[in-house]
Image (tube, grey):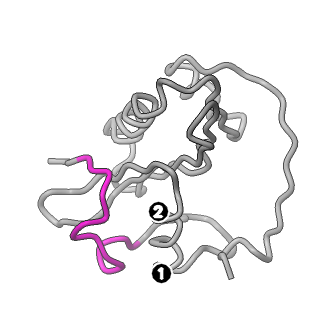
Amino acid sequence: MIRYINSLENINEDNMKGFFVDWPNPPSLKKHIEILKGSSYFWLAVDEKSKNVVGFITAISDKVLSAYIPLLEVLPEYKNKGIGSELVRLMMESLKDYYMIDLLCDEELTEFYKRFGMFKSQGMIIRNYNRQNGI
């Protein structure tokens, strides 16, 4: 059974392993915890049996009008079980009072996010891959 929480109580590096799949320079487990602590909002999906985090979503916000969702990830072995959808649903509920909620994603993910009322837009980005690990 999966439990959804928005607290780091009883969460540590030992139960946060396996994320940032296919990233050339992934953040360390310590940096991952820092990312969660530095986020305005986050939700975690925790496997009740193993006590491990199997998915997460983060948002940063001015806490007035806008929020941005930079990260959503579910461990590969837990994909296609509705965990990502539930994490997005919970985050959208957390952000429901904001004027704008922005998110950038790869083209193949646009249909997934359309299910939550999002629509395609244009954006500009910079990627400093040598800083991808947060160091």
Instruction: Please give left or right for residue 111 compared with residue 79 in the image.
Output: right
Total tally of numbered discs in the picture: 2
* Residue at 54% over, 46% down: 59
Q: Secondary structure at mark 2?
A: helix
Report x, y in % for residue 20.
55, 65
Which residue is nearer to you in this view: 30 or 51?
Answer: 30
* Residue at 32% over, 51% down: 6
Residue type beneath disc 1: Lys
Q: Secondary structure at mark 1?
A: helix
Report x, y in % for residue 66.
64, 34
Residue 72's place in the image compared with 16, above or below, is above
Report x, y in % for residue 11.
28, 70
Instruction: Please give left or right for residue 102 compared with residue 97 in the image.
Output: right
Residue 40's place in the image compared with 84, above or below, is below
* Membership of 30 in magenta stretch: no
Instruction: Please give left or right for residue 27 compared with residue 91 in the image.
Output: right
Q: Which residue is mark 2?
A: 36
Q: Are marks 2 and 1 in contact (CB under 8 Å)?
A: no
Q: Which residue is mark 1?
A: 30
- Segment tinted magenta in the rendering: 4-17
Label 2: few (<14), some or many (≥20) within 10 Å?
Answer: many
Label located before the other in sequence (2 or 1): 1
Which residue is nearer to you in this view: 69 or 52?
Answer: 69
* Residue at 56% over, 27% down: 98
